[in-house]
Image: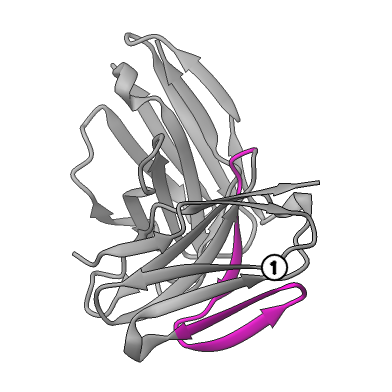
């Protein structure tokens, strides 16, 4: 099956800093989503981005499908951004199943 | 609020108990999913229902039994669980299997 790797595994930043989270995947995809899991365990969908660039407030994401990676940018971090960020992909001809990476744990310090 | 609710939010059960997890979506979606999130592991897809029919079962032990009585409700019936089944169980829904999935808050299950 498709492999999904996220980096870095852990990231600790001061409030106000910017960050870039990376997701590499091993095969062609027709679906890629970024999720934020808050400290209470809830998964929030951030972006549906199989290709191209999208922005939503302080967050933006870019997927370069031909090179099999996606980046999530967080600018002017706030403590509420803390949590685990997951990338999930659906492989082309992959039985329409989302495969999740192991996540990046982001901690924003006041 | 994502429009997907799960109850209970926390559950502690013994290995001989029988319990059920409930998921409800108010989004008019046609596909629903159960995921398991264990410590230090990626989320694992357990079951998928599309238009109330089970379309995927990822080699899940029979002590987990899903039920989808209609497109808005999904249950996960639990019996004779093991301590290693302790995890966060997440429900999700999507308009169709090709669309974005929206997750509920999860049920944190502890098996003693």
Q: Position of residue B12 (x, y in %)?
A: 50, 15
User: Nearest the camera: B3 or A1?
Assistant: A1
Q: Is residue A74 left or right of residue A64?
A: right
- Establish if B42 lies above or below B84: below
Instruction: Confirm whether the magenta stretch covers residue A48.
Output: yes
Q: Residue at x 56, y 72 (%)?
A: A72
Q: Position of residue B5 (x, y in %)?
A: 62, 45
Q: Residue at x 28, y 82 (%)?
A: A28
Q: Position of residue A20 (x, y in %)?
A: 57, 69
The residue that label 1 is drawn on is A18
SS at circle 1: loop
User: Nearest the camera: B10 or A33?
Assistant: A33
Q: Is residue B94 left or right of residue B81?
A: right
- Looking at the rendering, which quadrant does residue A27 occupy? bottom left
Chain letter for the residue marked with disc 1 in the picture: A
Query: What are the residue bounds of the magenta stretch?
Result: A40-63
- Establish if B94 lies above or below A28: above
Quarter of the picture containing the N terminus of chain A is bottom left
Of helix, strand and loop, which mostly describes the magenta segment?
strand
Instruction: Confirm whether the magenta stretch covers residue B73.
Output: no
- Looking at the rendering, which quadrant does residue B86 occupy? top left
Q: Residue at x 33, y 91 (%)?
A: A66
Q: Residue at x 24, y 50 (%)?
A: B57
Q: Is the residue marked by circle 1 packed among few (<14), some (14-19), or many (20+) residues within 10 Å?
A: some
User: Nearest the camera: A93 or B5?
Assistant: A93
């Amino acid at each position: 099956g498709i492999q999904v790797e996220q980096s870095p595994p852990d990231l600790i930043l001061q409030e106000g800093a910017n960050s870039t989270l990376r997701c590499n995947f091993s095969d062609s995809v027709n679906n890629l989503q970024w999720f934020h899991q808050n400290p209470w365990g809830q998964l929030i969908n951030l972006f549906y981005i199989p290709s191209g660039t999208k922005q939503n407030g302080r967050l933006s994401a870019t997927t370069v499908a031909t090179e099999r990676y996606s980046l999530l940018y967080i600018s002017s971090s706030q403590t509420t951004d803390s949590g685990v960020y997951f990338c999930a992909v659906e492989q082309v001809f992959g039985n329409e199943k989302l495969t999740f990476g192991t996540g990046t744990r982001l901690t924003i310090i006041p | 609020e994502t429009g997907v609710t799960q109850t209970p939010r926390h559950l502690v059960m013994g290995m001989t108990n029988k319990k059920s997890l409930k998921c409800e979506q108010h989004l008019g979606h046609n596909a629903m999913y159960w995921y398991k999130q264990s410590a230090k592991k990626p989320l694992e897809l357990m079951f998928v229902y599309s238009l109330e029919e089970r379309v995927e079962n990822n080699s899940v032990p029979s002590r987990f039994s899903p039920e989808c009585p209609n497109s808005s409700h999904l249950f996960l019936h639990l019996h004779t669980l093991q301590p290693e089944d302790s995890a966060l169980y997440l429900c999700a829904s999507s308009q169709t299997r090709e669309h974005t999935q929206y997750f509920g808050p999860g049920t944190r299950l502890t098996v003693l």
